[in-house]
């Protein structure tokens, strides 16, 4: 990301100077967002995404939805490379953050004001979905134009390979593939000519000035109505009760009836099949992030997702004839995932070298926090021409740095401070700690210290998962 491009776009659009910027925390996506503070006191959001096709889908969808008077951010400026753009600022309050705050205030009870916002989101949803019938160009969808048989198969394979296999859940390969095909046939019976948001959940619903807005719809495509309702009402970490889900589903169907003829029994028949495929896709995502990418906090999201499976099975909500898959799902619900998440969730320490010119690395863990060590006060091999193409992992740079006593002192203090936190985190069963070492270019001093602290931790704490990243070298 070139922040100067974002700043220039904002200045040209707003005819104001950008007085400061603030990098926003990264969530599950690779997109980078920066809040831009303008001289008149207003703000905009700058974004960078090197996936141009995904950007084009976002730009086109945003324009179309705004013409339909649907609350989405407005893209106000786009760079020539189509990778940098500026959009209106919807603030920081998501329906998810509001839900969790109000639950804490009300003893884990869903209050009327929270229900109000869920209903407003479900009031907006049919209008959004019907854009599929009002001329929206599905050819710009990315990565595919429809949630069709192939897309469904991708999601089910995602669950199979990244959850079942990585969690060591046994299954018959051919029998489960047969059941996948049966489930897909059931899913395809529902009408498929609507806009499917794909990730319509409370983290992608913003609250601003008492209204709901939606974001992150660039993965949208043609599909059935049921999927997005399932995504919102069965979001694992939202923790909605069965009674509230029923109330909200009825509310949605009442709203949908203003626009479409609705056979409620037929809708519900396919609805729970879509709930199932959404839950399986989510479990695949948690498995990928937790088991494959070694991010243990994602494993803590598995138990509430399994509760959704337990509800579907115990209430006979899955009408499709899928005996092998049901048996596998039953075995999933019989495992103690809370205990497994705690066991698998051993402490991970992410050690990262970085350049201050490109910003402090984001911490994607749930608990957040950690260390940022500034190595710029130490002797700089980057000023010496002979080290121009070397890094802090090369012998010549290591020799250069280790001839200085202040480097040894800094390293000793660094080890002592980090060790203190690691000992404490292990005792308290925390799962994540960030250690960031920065210098001017992210090439010599920061790389040297990140490598040294990482190697030290691996040697001293063999049961700790230590990840070493040299961001600018990558």
Image: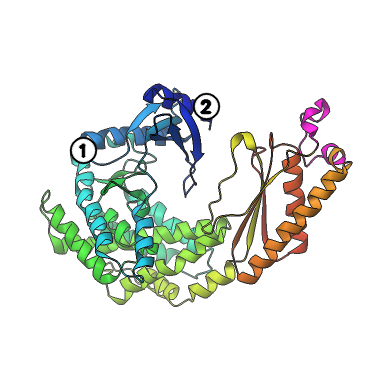
* Position of residue 284 measured from the top left corner of the image (x, y, whole percent): 45, 59
The magenta stretch spans residue 184: no
Check disc 2 and report its element: helix, strand or loop.
Answer: helix
* Mark 1 crowd level (few <14, some 14–19, many ≥20, 10 Å Cα): few
- Could you tell which of marks 2 and 1 lies nearer the N-terminus? 2
Residue drawn at (16%, 61%) of the image: 266
Q: Nearer the viewer, residue 59 or 132?
A: 59
User: In the displayed structure, does residue 204 sit left or right of residue 25?
Assistant: left
| Quarter of the rendering containing residue 244 | bottom left
* Position of residue 138 measured from the top left corner of the image (x, y, whole percent): 28, 37
Q: Which mark is residue 297?
A: none
| Quarter of the rendering containing residue 143 | top left
371 to 333, vertically: above or below: above
* Mark 2 crowd level (few <14, some 14–19, many ≥20, 10 Å Cα): few
User: In the displayed structure, does residue 83 sit left or right of residue 147?
Assistant: right
User: Label 2 belongs to which residue?
Assistant: 4
Discs 2/1, front? 2
The magenta stretch spans residue 387: yes
What segment carries the magenta color? 379-399
User: In the displayed structure, does residue 312 sit left or right of residue 422?
Assistant: left
In the rendered image, the quadrant that contains the C terminus is top right
User: Label 1 belongs to which residue?
Assistant: 69
Check disc 1 and report its element: helix, strand or loop.
Answer: loop
Residue drawn at (23%, 61%) of the image: 270
* Position of residue 347 measured from the top left corner of the image (x, y, whole percent): 63, 63
Observer able to see residue 63: yes
């Amino acid at each position: 990301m070139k922040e100067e491009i974002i700043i220039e776009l904002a200045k040209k659009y707003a005819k104001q100077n950008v007085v400061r910027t603030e990098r926003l925390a990264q969530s599950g996506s690779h997109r980078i967002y920066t809040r831009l503070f303008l001289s008149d006191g207003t703000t905009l959001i700058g974004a960078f995404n090197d996936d141009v096709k995904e950007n084009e889908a976002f730009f086109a969808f945003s324009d179309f939805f705004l013409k339909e008077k649907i609350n989405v951010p407005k893209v106000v400026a786009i760079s020539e490379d189509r990778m940098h753009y500026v959009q209106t600022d919807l603030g920081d309050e998501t329906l998810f953050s509001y839900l969790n705050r109000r639950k804490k205030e009300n003893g884990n009870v869903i209050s009327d004001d929270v229900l109000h916002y869920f209903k407003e989101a479900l009031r907006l949803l049919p209008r959004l979905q019907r854009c599929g019938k009002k001329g929206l160009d599905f050819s710009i969808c990315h990565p595919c134009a429809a949630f069709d048989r192939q897309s469904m198969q991708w999601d089910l394979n995602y669950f199979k390979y990244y959850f079942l296999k990585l969690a060591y859940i046994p299954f018959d390969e051919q029998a489960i593939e047969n059941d996948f095909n049966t489930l897909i046939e059931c899913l395809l019976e529902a009408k498929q000519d609507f806009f499917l948001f794909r990730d319509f959940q409370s983290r992608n619903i913003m609250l601003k000035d008492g209204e709901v807005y939606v974001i992150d719809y660039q993965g949208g495509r043609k599909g059935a109505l049921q999927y997005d309702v399932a995504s919102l009402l069965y979001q694992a970490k939202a923790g909605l009760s069965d009674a509230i889900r029923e109330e909200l589903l009825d509310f949605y169907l009442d709203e949908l009836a203003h626009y479409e003829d609705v056979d409620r029994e037929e809708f519900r028949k396919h609805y729970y099949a879509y709930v199932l495929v959404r839950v399986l896709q989510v479990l695949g995502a948690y498995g990928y992030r937790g088991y494959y990418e070694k991010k243990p906090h994602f494993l803590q999201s598995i138990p509430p997702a399994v509760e959704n499976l337990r509800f579907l099975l115990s209430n006979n909500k899955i009408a499709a004839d899928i005996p092998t898959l049901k048996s596998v799902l039953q075995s999933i619900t019989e495992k103690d995932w809370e205990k497994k998440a705690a066991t698998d969730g051993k402490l991970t320490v992410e050690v990262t070298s970085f350049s201050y010119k490109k910003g402090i690395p984001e911490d994607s863990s749930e608990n957040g926090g950690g260390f940022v060590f500034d190595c710029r006060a130490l002797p700089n091999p980057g000023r010496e021409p002979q080290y121009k193409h070397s890094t802090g992992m090369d012998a010549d740079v290591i020799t250069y740095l280790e001839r200085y006593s202040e480097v040894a002192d800094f390293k000793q203090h660094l080890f002592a401070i980090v060790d203190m936190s690691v000992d404490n985190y292990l005792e308290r069963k925390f799962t994540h700690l960030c250690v960031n070492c920065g210098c001017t270019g992210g090439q010599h001093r920061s790389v040297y210290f990140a490598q040294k602290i990482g190697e030290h931790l691996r040697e001293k704490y063999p049961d700790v998962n230590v990840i070493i990243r040299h961001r600018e070298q990558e």
